[in-house]
Image (cartoon, helix red, strand yellow):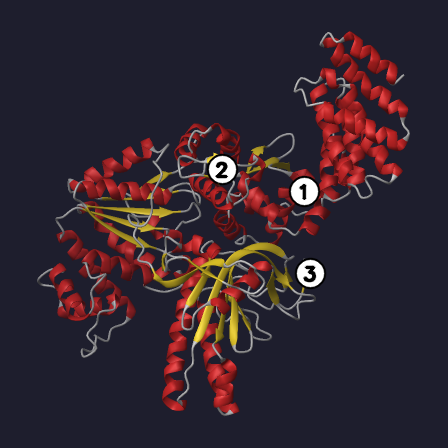
Amino acid sequence: MTSAVPSVCRSCGAAPQGGARFCGACGVALTDTVEAAKYRQVTVLFADVVRSMDIAAALDPERYREVMTDLVGRAAAVARRYGGTVEFTGDGVMAFFGAPIALEDHAFRGCLAGLAIQAEARIVASEVARRDGVELLVRVGLNSGRVIAGEIGSGSQGYRVTGPAVGLAQRMESAAPADEVMLSESTARLVEHAVVLAPPEFVRIKGSEQPVAARRLVDIGQRDGLVGRTDARLVGRRWELAALDALVDRAIGGRGGVVQVVGSPGVGKSRVAREVAALAARRGVDVVWVFCESHARDVPFQVVTRLLRATVGVAELDGDAARARVRAAMAPDADPQDLLLLDDLLGIADPAVVPPVIDSDARRRRLTALITAATLARTRPMVVIVEDAHWIDAVSESMIADFLTVISRTPSMVLVTARPEYRGALTEVAGGQSIVLVPLGDSDVEALLGELMGSDPSVGELAATIVERAAGNPFFTEEMVRELAQRGVLAGERGEFVCLTSAADVEVPATVHAAIAARIDRLTGPAKHALDAASVIGIRFRGELLAALGVDAAVDELIDAELIEQVRFTPTAEYAFCHPLIAAVAYESQLKHDRAEWHRRLAAVIQERQPGARDENAILIGEHLYAAGQLADAHSWYMRGAAWSLFRDIDAARTSWQRARRIADELPDADSDPVVISMRLAPRTMLCATHALDRTKYESTGLFAELQTLCEAAGDKVSLAIGMVGQAVDLLYDGRVHEAARLAAEHM
């Protein structure tokens, strides 16, 4: 890390004012620490004016500048409102969501910004048409993908994102119809359950010979936990559902309660909530949902307003109809002034009526008393679900906590989902209960995969790999299957897939990557640095190894964030990542150059710390050197490791020779450099010589032919004779004595 004046706030992404010590947008202290560039999953937005040159020709230069300044300023403000980092492109803006702070909903935020930019553009266009008689239209395009994000050069050019994903976003903007928002296929996949999209279409873009898939963004969908998705069968949650079912029964009987369902991202909180809502609905119980959203966590009253509009029944109403419904739902003797306060809170106030002038504390007390009275008077059972309370705004949290104090005396159950780090007021309700969702067992994940993928023999190896990588997280499991199907690794339909390639092709899906990266980004700089180093070491690592690398372990912060856990205390502290995909995201986010440097340093540290165990650690050292790009050195250590394993485990030795063989083949001048040819010969010689001892039975014919070709090129008859011993022994075992004798005679 280096020092420079930050071009963006590391907390919210806003551009700070010159000389400011705190961000003017979010209030967080500005730091001059510039982190290394990293890979990020982002959504890039381009917005530009249609036929801007014609507009420039039609308007006075000063008027044109005035219009463009207004339009671009509005667009930039919208993008920043939704967490975007903005660059100006002359007649438009480029914004990216998901860097410098990772956002798990970056694509959804981009869609919100795209529609809002068009709304602002129409306001400007209306004024331009009225005043200048000129038509002004804007196009918006979005694309989601992997980019490199970081400061360019010394930092004077600011924080930038680079990569093909940026170019495709610009192509989407060029392909968008005027006054529309066009999404690439990758963005559409990320938001298809949260927005309204037009049917797929194919558009021609610069740089592509074939048309590419795209979809126009129509609107933001109405979030409803019971609509718009097909869930797999819920597995591994029998006890939790039984407990929640009993709480629903208690509520129906008039003894309500509050229960918090806690779990890490993807472990199944929302899925359990949907199951509870479905069983309540089947019993005729009213179900109300409210969602807390990361982009609105600083918007006061956001959640409480939505909750009250839903419970009172005015979510789809406005004006007189909404106000009439409110009065029907409240107590008959409710104070008219209090009802006006409630109208104002719900956003349905009559513009012709002046609301009471009252201080905030008194307003809150009166509203709480009004809502509490209505809650206690309710006789019909209800289940209220508050999703993702870790993103609730502070005002809503406080007011809802006040409302919940009387829930136990009503026929209502309130289910709150939250992540483990949430410690807010909704966890402190008297009599509230908590259910912690732990990762699923392997058998449950296998059952889930059976439903998602089917039972074709070709998916068996792939399913085993997913079970290992998902580590009990159902969301990660489903997203990996979805990503494999989208990439064509899996062919067919859900529940009837066929695998077309190797299990090694399992990658971290973009949705999972963004969710984990968002957690990592909440860490301090030293903790992120430690996590980067640890991800290079492996799933398990020792604190002393981090120290040997010169890294401040910062393990307490990493443990508190539930990214790692301590698995051994003595004789030396040892830690493990809480989930394999956390290690994968931390590792894959680093640039290849940075990862290579960590691997090189690790190889050196392992050699220096245990000089007497270098043979034993040879394979590990070789692996780190290979990852560092030092192929020749890696080959040497693999050969050394194979020699150490030879009389301990022949299969391990042969695996090391196979690895050395592949590494040597990757070296430059593999067919002409005598040194490289010698390196290619050595592992092949040993593999052929020990073929008869191979319990895994590698196919040998091609390997012997390779050895013979290389030996002839190098004039090395000794290696050929040694290698042919294995083939001769194989022939003897098969009873083909004469062939074995002839082979031996040929190479003696």
**Looking at this view, is 327 or 336 the one in front?**
327
Query: Which label number is shown at residue 2?
Result: 3
Residue 107 on image: x %, y %: 45, 58
* Local SS, label 3: strand
Crowding at dot 3, Cα within 10 Å, few <14 / some 14-19 / many 20+, comes out as few
Q: Amino acid at mark 3?
A: Thr
- Give the number of marks: 3
Give the quarter of the figure containing the C terminus. top right
* Local SS, label 2: helix
Q: CA distance from mark 1 to mark 2?
A: 26 Å
* Relative side of 13 to 347, left or right: right
Query: Which label number is shown at residue 546?
Result: 1
Query: Which label number is shown at residue 470?
Result: 2
Q: Amino acid at mark 2?
A: Ala
Tell whether label 3 touches label 1 (CB within 8 Å): no
Q: Residue at coordinates 44% horizontally, 75% vertically from top-left?
A: 138
Q: CA distance from mark 1 to mark 3?
A: 20 Å
Residue 100 on image: x %, y %: 56, 60
Tell whether label 2 touches label 1 (CB within 8 Å): no
Residue 377 higher or lower than 305, as above or below: above
Q: Residue at coordinates 68% horizontally, 63% vertically from top-left?
A: 3
**Looking at this view, is 496 or 548 the one in front?**
496
